[in-house]
Structures are given as C-alpha cells and as structure tokens.
Image (cartoon, helix red, strand yellow):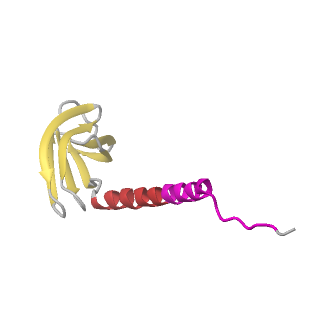
Amino acid sequence: MATKLKGMTSLEIAIIVAIVLIIAVAVGWYLYTTFVASTTGQPRLNVVSAEITASKNELKLVLVNPGPVDVQISAVEAGGQSTQVTQTITVGQQTTLTVSLSGTWTPGTMVPGRVILSGGQSFPFNALVKP
C-alpha cells in the first residue's frame, strides 16, 4: 500500500507566519526603543566645589554641565534650607552659583545639600563651611 505524501496545511502555514510576525515586531520594537533612548539624553551636572561662607551666609557652588543636554536649575538645598533658583547651564559650560542662606554655620563642618533640576533630578554635594 502506497502512502500519500501531504504538504503543509493552511493552519500550519498560518501558525508559522504568526510566529515570524511576532518575532519581527519584537525585534523592531527593541530597535526602535534603543534608538529613541540613544537620541534623548538625561541631564547631568557635576558639582565641582561647594563652600558656605559663615560670615556672609552665602553658599557658593561651582557647577559644570558635561552634557548631553542643557540643564535648568530650579532649587538648591543646603542644611535643610531650600532656595528657589532659576538658571540654565548649557552643555560644556562652567558656572558659579551664589545662593543666600540664613542660619548659623559652624566653620570647619560639612553641610549636606543638593542641586535640584526642573525635571526633578537632584545632584548631591557636601559644602565646607568657612569663617
């Protein structure tokens, strides 16, 4: 008795096409999200130095924006005090930011603080208190 060879049925072809389509969509989505993530940069900010002059109640910050995007500073916190600031630092720019504070500062101590950007990101620092 001879057996009759049969090709793939339409259901088998549909399953294979569906699997290939799902894999293609997954690879395409991965490539798309990787591309979008590489073109939109997260803001970065380096706090080079931070000093509080106790006699003047001033906080002096030296900041550098290494890129890849401009940063907009919205506030500076130091020793539990928050001060609103509006300053933009462009990519590659170094700037000195002076903020007035209130309170009593002990020379020789370190005061924790942070720079807060308009997007909510914060960059911590420790400020040295000078007389």
Can see residue 56? no
Residue 20 is left or right of residue 42, and the answer is: right
Query: 19 or 103: nearer the eye?
Result: 19
Residue 107 is left or right of residue 91, and the answer is: right
Image: magenta residue range: 3-23
**Picture coordinates of residue 126, whole percent (x, y):** 32, 46
Q: Residue at x 15, y 49 (%)?
A: 97
Q: In the rendered view, would you say 24 is above or below 112?
A: below
Q: In the rendered view, would you say 8 is above or below 85?
A: below
Which quadrant, please, contains the C terminus?
top left
Q: Residue at x 24, y 31 (%)?
A: 81
Quadrant in the rendering for residue 103:
top left
**Main SS, magenta residues:** helix
Residue 47 is left or right of residue 93, and the answer is: right
Quadrant in the rendering for residue 91:
bottom left
**Picture coordinates of residue 18, whole percent (x, y):** 53, 54
Q: Residue at x 28, y 37 (%)?
A: 106
Query: 70 or 46: nearer the eye?
Result: 70
Residue 4 is left or right of residue 100, and the answer is: right
